[in-house]
Image (cartoon, rainbow, N blue to C red):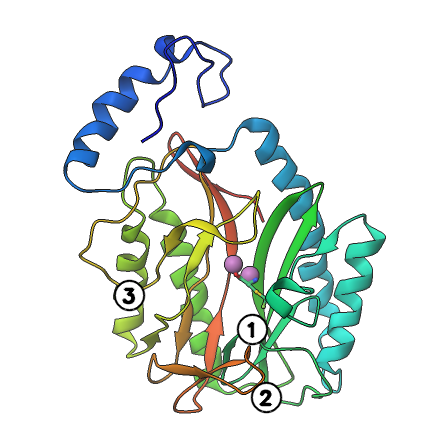
């Protein structure tokens, strides 16, 4: 629980003293939730307007890369060539590709093809007709992180692959609609799991969304599956990702011997979409 002194400036960025701004609503809304067992975010997770602007600047690079990849990702391109474009664009615009050397990750983005759930390492693989690929971009600009990913398709894909991609996108956007101040973050996963269940899809449990902005991975943990446990309360100024990974078959996956590539156990397809969002007074704003 963050305890500002009453004469401090309010965390919300209004410039007013805390006692004249959010103190009362914080006490009134958050204290009962805390007593009911819901974790309340510590102060460091509540970002101010300047920090959120920094993330928006960083996101301009991330979004421009994802946009340009729509034209670049075509049959015959290698995932290494995609990586080279991402790396050069980021550096040319004053940013740093966050994945490079992150916990030993060797490349500047993740390229996850077909049965790869996430953390695919760019390499010599040539994309071929019918492939689906998630490209995950995280940019650092001026110390601020923005994290987003999209699905790309090569040539003619199957109806089953198309449906998986579309439903996963719906999962992300419906999950984002569940981002509301003073609600538990677990409501995002409840919504996503309900949609996936309707199609018999598996919701990946091993990896979750995460706080982002000042660091690559931070609290809260944003699970995409259903939970009954009390999860952290969302408060205006919190920034995190919603990034459901949805499988055609089993939700279970395993890591390959390269220590990164995370694949489905049954070799069926997996899709993922990701946005970075900030909690606002009446919902959230997508930053990417
Ligand atoms: N961008 C991924 C995420 O959404 C994390 C990639 S970590 C890396 O959280 F090291 F593989 F790049
Ligand atoms: Co992420
Ligand atoms: Co990402």
What label sits on residue 237 in the rendered view? none
Crowd around label 1: few <14 · some 14–19 · many ≥20 (10 Å): many
Nearest to viewer (mark 1 / mark 2): 1
Residue drawn where x is 71% and y is 79% of the image: 79
**Residue closer to the observer: 276 or 17:** 17
Q: Marks 1 and 2: CB-CB under 8 Å?
A: no
Q: Marks 3 and 2: CB-CB under 8 Å?
A: no
Q: Where in the image, quadrant-wise, is ligand 3 located?
A: bottom right
Nearest to viewer (mark 1 / mark 3): 1
Q: Which residue is mark 1?
A: 119
Q: Residue 135: name its quadrant.
A: bottom right
Looking at the image, residue 21 sits to the left or right of residue 30; the answer is right
Q: Is residue 92 above or below residue 19?
A: below
Q: Residue furthest front?
A: 104
Q: Which residue is mark 3?
A: 193
Q: CA distance from mark 3 to mark 2?
A: 27 Å
Q: Is residue 18 above or below residue 227?
A: above
Looking at the image, residue 154 sits to the left or right of residue 39; the answer is right
Looking at the image, residue 135 sits to the left or right of residue 221; the answer is right
> x%, y% of residue 126?
71, 88
Q: Residue furthest right?
A: 92
> x%, y% of residue 42?
38, 35
Q: Which residue is mark 2?
A: 130
The quadrant of the picture occupied by the N terminus is: top left
First along the sequence among labels 1 and 3: 1
Q: Secondary structure at mark 1?
A: loop
């Amino acid at each position: 629980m963050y305890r500002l002194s009453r004469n401090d400036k309010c965390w919300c960025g209004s410039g007013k003293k805390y006692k004249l701004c959010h103190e009362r609503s914080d006490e009134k809304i958050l204290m009962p939730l805390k007593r009911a067992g819901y974790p309340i975010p510590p102060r460091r997770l509540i970002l101010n307007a300047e920090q959120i602007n920094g993330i928006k600047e960083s996101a301009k690079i991330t979004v421009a890369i994802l946009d340009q990849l729509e034209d670049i990702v075509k049959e015959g391109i290698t995932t290494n060539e995609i990586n080279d474009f991402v790396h050069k664009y980021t550096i040319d615009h004053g940013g740093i590709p966050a994945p490079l050397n992150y916990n030993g990750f060797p490349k500047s983005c993740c390229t996850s093809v077909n049965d790869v759930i996430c953390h695919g390492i760019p390499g010599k693989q040539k994309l071929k007709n019918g492939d689906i690929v998630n490209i995950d971009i995280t940019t650092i600009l001026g110390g601020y992180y923005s994290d987003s990913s999209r699905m790309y398709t090569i040539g003619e894909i199957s109806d089953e692959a198309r449906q998986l991609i579309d439903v996963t996108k719906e999962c992300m956007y419906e999950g984002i609609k569940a981002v509301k101040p003073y609600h538990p973050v677990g409501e995002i996963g409840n919504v996503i799991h309900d949609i996936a269940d309707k199609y018999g899809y598996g919701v990946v449990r091993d990896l979750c969304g995460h706080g982002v902005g000042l660091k690559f991975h931070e609290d809260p943990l944003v699970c995409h599956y259903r939970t009954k446990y009390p999860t952290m309360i969302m408060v205006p100024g919190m920034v995190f990702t919603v990034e459901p990974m949805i499988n055609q078959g089993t939700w279970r996956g395993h890591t390959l011997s390269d220590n990164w590539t995370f694949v489905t156990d049954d070799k069926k397809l997996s899709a993922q979409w990701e946005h970075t969002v900030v909690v606002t007074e009446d919902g959230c704003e997508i930053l990417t």
